[in-house]
Image (spheres, rainbow, N blue to C red):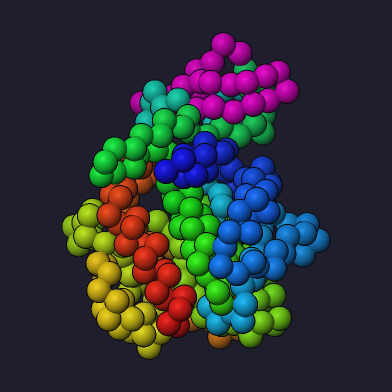
Amino acid sequence: MQLLRTLCQFPAPSGNEAALAAFLLDYVRREQAGWRVQPQVLADDARFQDCILLVFGEPRTAVFAHLDSIGFMVRYGRELVPIGGPRAEAGYRLVGRDGQGEIDCELTVDAETGALGYEFSREIERGTELTFRCDFRATATTVQSCYLDNRLGVWNALRLCETLENGIVAFSCWEEHGGGSVAYLAQYIYENYGVRQALISDITWVSEGVRPGRGCAISLRDSLIPRRAYVERIRRIAEQSGIPFQLEVEGGGGSDAKELQRAAQPWDWCFVGAPEDNVHSPNELVDKRDIESMLALYRVLLEKL
């Protein structure tokens, strides 16, 4: 779990993913010699900003994993505004850095208005981003930390690269706060490789119907509905593989699939990811059996789809 621990410790709130992207590029350069196939690495500011594309062999399927996380931004004085949809409870420890130095402060929540702020020895410079302080905890059966959504999805994609022969792995930005990058990534992939089917390597939530330890979730719908014929192909492959999985049906939520659904190209997509408890908090919790199920299923799906 050392790679996952490192990924969770990187501050990368939506819009400021550059440092994490640089780490991933360095990781790929160091590790790819041991992978089954060495990918074409596409990463330049003019075309992709802080996103990264890894192209293996003759791709048929693209895997999307978003780099960014939720967080907070300093407004004026001691006010905070959320980045994405973080859980906000008074006392959460937030960290960051501004022109005056390192920051380790506490989140405050006004009991009457719900307004967010911080408690610190000085005022923090406006525009400074604050993220949950990382306390990574791994036991024999679980992993708990901030930002498992979506550093676990990124971890899954990187581990998939070790054995991937044909496929595209796309690391996207801004998913937690409105999206935007998948639109141009999807267009580039479609126009240059003819790929139009995708898997979303992201983390969903534990619910009354999706329980920890019973395998990763194949989502039949969230706020959007994927094309049923494509989802049924994935379901049949999963059933034949013998890998544990659960079917998810929700009425809300979303992912990088939002931009694929609305693309000008005919993309098929399906969300396949492990469920977590304590969503968007410093204490996100995932069962290791679901992590194993997720990676195993992705390896089979990228081979069979």
Return the x and y of residue 125 as percentages of the image width and height: 68, 24
Residue lying furthest bottom: 229
Instruction: Considering the whole magenta stretch, tell me its main secondary structure.
Output: strand
Q: Nearer the viewer, residue 179 or 292?
A: 292
Q: Residue at x 57, y 38 (%)?
A: 11
Residue lying furthest top: 121
When the figure is inspected, residue 101 is found, relative to residue 81, above or below; the finding is above
Can you see residue 218?
A: yes
Return the x and y of residue 295 as percentages of the image width and height: 40, 62
Q: Residue at x 68, y 54 (%)?
A: 29
Q: Nearer the viewer, residue 74 or 235?
A: 235
Residue 130 as seen in the image, left or right of residue 184 = left
When the figure is inspected, residue 10 is found, relative to residue 246, above or below; the finding is above
Return the x and y of residue 43 as percentages of the image width and height: 73, 60
Range of residues picked out in magenta: 94-122
Q: Residue at x 48, y 49 (%)?
A: 151
117 inside magenta stretch: yes
Q: Quick one: quadrant of the C terminus?
A: bottom left
Return the x and y of residue 177 as percentages of the image width and height: 55, 52
When the figure is inspected, residue 8 is found, relative to residue 48, above or below; the finding is above
Residue 267 as seen in the image, left or right of residue 23 = left
Residue 260 as seen in the image, left or right of residue 270 = right
99 inside magenta stretch: yes
Q: Residue at x 56, y 77 (%)?
A: 166
Can you see residue 109?
A: no
